[in-house]
Amino acid sequence: MELSGEIAVAANAVEIRQAVQQNVAAIFISGRLLANRLIGQDDEGLLSLSEYAHFFRNMCLTTNVPLIADGQAGFGNPLNTYETAQELIRSGANYLVLNDQKYPSHSQIPNSPEDLVEFLGKIKACQDSLQATDCQIILKFDGIAIYGLNGLKNVLNWLRN
C-alpha cells in the first residue's frame, strides 16, 4: 500500500470527518493531540499503549480512509515495540509511525535519541510483527538535531543492510 497525497492529523471523529471531506490520503491519529484532549497535557508520553489503542480502535470505526497510528518510541524496548505494533495492527492501523527517541516519547521537547543498536532492534521487532499484514512502518527521525545528517546516513545504511 503506497501512501501518496496529503495526510491530515486528527484526535477525534469530527476532525476525521473534516479530513475525509478534504479527500486526504491518510489520517495520522496523533498521540500528542490525544493527550491534550484526554488529560489536558501536551505530552504523548503520558499516555499508555492501552489508552491510545482503545481510542485508535474507536476512530477506525469512523472512516475507511487509511489511518496512521502513533507508535511513538515503541512504548519501551524491542519486545515492547513488537507488542505495540501487534496491538495497533489489531486496532486497525494501516501505517505505524516509530520514532527514534528513547521511551517515553515527547514532542514538545523531544527525548534524546535511542542508541542505534536499540533503535535498529525496535525496527526489526516492528518489521517482524508486521510480516503477515499490509501495515507499513513510517520512521520518524526526531534525533536528527542531535546526530545530524551523517548520523541519519549511518542509520539508513544500517537499515539497508
Image (cartoon, rainbow, N blue to C red):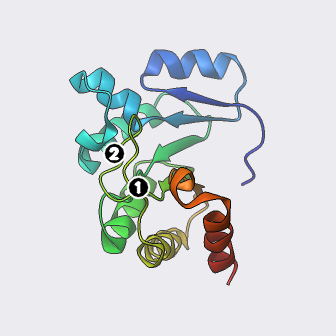
Mark 2 and mark 1: Cα distance apart in space: 9 Å
| Rendered location of residue 156, percent (x, y) | 67, 70
Image height check: is 88 above or below 78?
above
Q: Can you identify the residue that label 1 sits on?
A: 90
Q: Is residue 55 above or below residue 131?
A: above
| Residue 69 drawn at (x, y percent) | 48, 45
Relative placement, left or right, of 87 versus 131 is: left
Q: Please say if 109 is above or below 146.
A: above
Q: Looking at the rendered structure, which numbered label has been put on residue 53?
A: 2
Circle 1 Cα neighbour tier, 10 Å, few/some/many (<14 / 14–19 / ≥20): few
Disc 1, SS = helix
Amino acid type of the residue that numbered disc 1 sits on in the rendered structure: Arg
**Residue ID at (70%, 78%):** 160
Mark linked to residue 41? none
Of 60 and 118, which appears nearest the observer?
118
Asked where in the image residue 5 lies, by quadrant, the reply is top right
SS for dot 2: helix
